[in-house]
Image: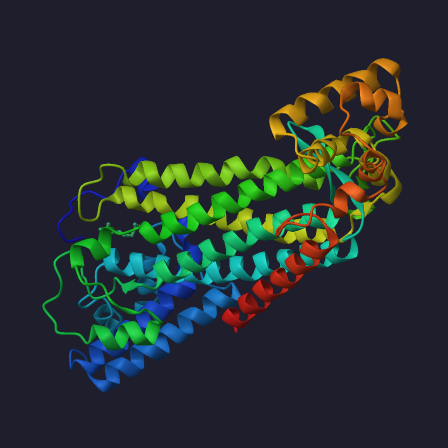
Amino acid sequence: MGRFEEPPDPLFRRLNASVAFDRRLWREDVAGSRAHVESLHRAGVIEGADRNALLAGLDAVAAELDGGSFEFRDEDEDVHMAIERRLTEIAGPVGGKLHTGRSRNDQVATDLALFARAHSERALELTGGLMSRLLELAVAHADWPMPGYTHLQRAQAVYLGHHLLAYFWMLARDARRFGAARAAAVDSLPLGAGALAGLNWELDREATARELGFEAPAANSIDAVSNRDFVLDYLHAASVCATHLSRLGAEIVIWSSEEFGFCKPADDFSSGSSLMPQKKNPDAAELLRAKAPRVTGSLLTLTGVLHALPLAYSKDLQEDKEALFDAVDTIELCLEAAERMLAGLAFDRARLAAAAADEMVAATDVADLLVRRGMPFREAHGVVGGLVRTALELGVSLSELDRDELARHSELLDDEYYEVLGEGAWLESKRSQGGTGSAPLAAQIEAARRVLESLSEAGR
Ligand code: ARG
């Protein structure tokens, strides 16, 4: 047909065809085609009767795709050609008018932008769901002491609610990034750019942009067909979000070990061992931990595809889709699963409290007591280091050191030393904004509520 004397080699066909995966864009493709038909009609390029026939034909094709009766053929290279082929079968030769003033280059960029918009919105919704679960858990565990860690060594005590809210704020930043990815997707409409140079028809691109929900038509037709920044933006947002989930998953794996015993996953979110009858494994948390590099891999794939790619369209760009689809599927599954897994997680108050009762986590508080008595912090740090060493040598806790022992280390140490080491004192002493004490934690919970509210308002 046309320019070619030979049909494509089957091997080339396999390499070249994208229909196996880009069929997923059919809804976006039909929506773009409908808008294009209206645009052609508005500009007087096609008559009213053709417009009606094309729209009815597209409806029929969409119904087949929706109902699962649509038959893709071997010769359909991609979803765009499959839909046009079927449209022409159903509507007759008028189907051949659909591609007037359009190239698959501006068509596929438009489809993908619509897809990226829809899934940025979905990610926002799921991120909000996970944030609200974290907030709920934080409120329920706002006064449960636990050790906070640095280097995975006990550092200072915190409340579990405070620790859980750390993830809330990570996800709040993810929500902001998904929001930006959404804005990037609809920033400029590719359709109307043609293959790269623009069209021989004066279509009203402003109207089409409005109809499809874009801010404006793309200002430069060359940029329009080669731009995939909005996919990079989505993939970056998804990659950072998946990385956050991997840290959450990793902590839950550690916490649910026998050695920590801080929490237990619910039965329906863990699995047993085929060999060892006693096992209950935190598989969901492990998979949250392991999925992140895969999403980041998608981001790197597209960065690689775009790297040094000359303008405008090259078939390389077809490789954008599987990377995006896999990232979408992975992050949406992980966000939903993380929320459900957390919902069933049972924390062990006694185990957490016992670990947090280790007085060594209050060493900084003793040093700050000396600072309040006038000693420079660096010196106080050394004095308390000596107290810690003495306690370890004697095999006692810090509060078991008597007044004589204290006096040997510093004459500034008085009875308030024992108050500083009193139960819960070193938690409530963290009164600074953003700290773990009950007062700043309550303020933090309020701030989190407001963020969540504005997020759900923005989604409405
Ligand atoms: N399947 C192609 C893609 O995904 C559609 C665009 C094809 N354009 C072209 N000039 N061959 O990128």
Q: Residue furthest top?
A: 393
Residue at the image point whose x is 49% and y is 41% from the top: 295
Residue at the image point whose x is 18% and y is 41% from the top: 310
Of residues 411 and 206, the one nearer the viewer is: 411
Where residue 268 sits in the image (x, y, percent)?
Answer: 79, 47
Of residues 294 and 195, the one nearer the viewer is: 294
Q: Quadrant of residue 60?
A: bottom left
Where residue 388 sits in the image (x, y, percent)?
Answer: 77, 21
Answer left or right for 344 relative to 87: right
Answer left or right for 10 relative to 20: left
Answer left or right for 116 relative to 204: right
Q: Is residue 270 visible?
A: no
Where residue 91 sits in the image (x, y, percent)?
Answer: 32, 74
Q: Residue furthest left?
A: 200
For residue 232, above or below residue 371: below
Of residues 391 and 99, the one nearer the viewer is: 391
